[in-house]
Amino acid sequence: MNEQMITFFIVAALLTISPGADTMLVIRNVISSNARRGLLTTTGICSGLFFHAALSALGVSVILVKSAAAFYVLKTVGAIYLCWLGVQSLRKAFEKEGNSTSFKENKNHSVKLKKSFLEGWLNNVLNPKTAVFYFAFLPQFINPGDPVFIKSIGLAGIHCVMSFIWLSFIVFSVHSVRLLFIRPFFRRTLEGLSGGVLISLGIKLAFESR
């Protein structure tokens, strides 16, 4: 492994383990449902990395870097989406106990697989910081003469594997202690905390500069 790839691994690993909206969404979905939904959310998040890599390779991401208007629009949409997810969690947190779904019911309930995957995918794709990061970061590891698109997807694949392993670890860690919060009070508290964090991240994104 050459020095260039070692640098890529280190930076990608630091990006992966840094807590953010992706991590919070995975935790939220495990708490509100089960590990299966958390893994599907993780798969959606990791799939979004290939989307950013493809845009970077095709040069589309340059629009986000050069155009303040385009960056602002994507940032606003991403912020609204995070706030919407947060509001959904807060709504569950304030549901009356009689209307609240128990953990046992949640476990037997058929989870909407597409929704879980789509939540993760959108959460990643609508993050302008990820798009800008990929545009600024990946080209540094593509040498003259390299097949740009193929190498970009390959590097995203490495990042995808790292992200999937890390987020899966979070999924099973949260799931292993989930039964400790079987009481509706604790579950609503966790939903409220998750909602508050997601809304805070959305507000932070909305007012962040590049």
Image (cartoon, rainbow, N blue to C red):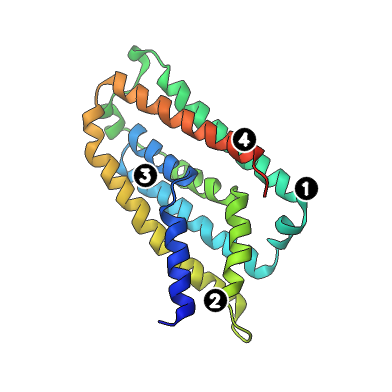
Dot 1 surroundings within 10 Å: few (below 14), some, or many (20 or more)? few
Q: Amino acid at mark 2?
A: Lys
* SS assignment at label 3: helix
Whole-number angstrom distance, CA of label 4 to CA of label 3: 22 Å
| Residue nearer the viewer, 1 or 58 | 1
- Between 20 and 97, the residue placed more toward the observer is 20
Reading the image, the residue beneath label 4 is 80
Nearest-to-viewer mark from 1 and 3 = 1
Figure quadrant of residue 77: top right
**What is the distance, in whole Å, between disc 1 and disc 3 at their CAs?**
34 Å
Residue for badge 1 = 69
For residue 152, above or below residue 79: below
* Mark 1 touches mark 3? (CB < 8 Å): no
Write down the residue under mark 2. 151
**Which of pointers 4 and 3 lies earlier in the amino acid sequence?**
3
Q: Which residue bears the numbered disc 3? A: 38
Which is more N-terminal, label 3 or label 1?
Answer: 3
Cα separation, mark 1 vs mark 2, equals 30 Å
- Tell me which numbered mark, 4 or 1, is placed earlier along the sequence: 1
Label 4 amino acid? Ile
Please report contact status of discs 4 and 1: CB closer than 8 Å, yes or no: no
Q: Are marks 1 and 2 in contact (CB under 8 Å)?
A: no
Q: Amino acid at mark 3?
A: Gly
Mark 4 or 1, closer to the camera: 1
Judging from the image, what secondary structure is the residue with disc 2 in?
helix
Callout 4 secondary element: helix
Decide which of tag 3 and tag 2 comes sooner along the chain. 3
Name the element at disc 1.
helix
Q: Nearer the viewer, residue 45 or 163?
A: 163
Image coordinates for residue 20, horizontal then vertical, percent:
47, 45
Q: Position of residue 17 (x, y in %)?
A: 40, 53
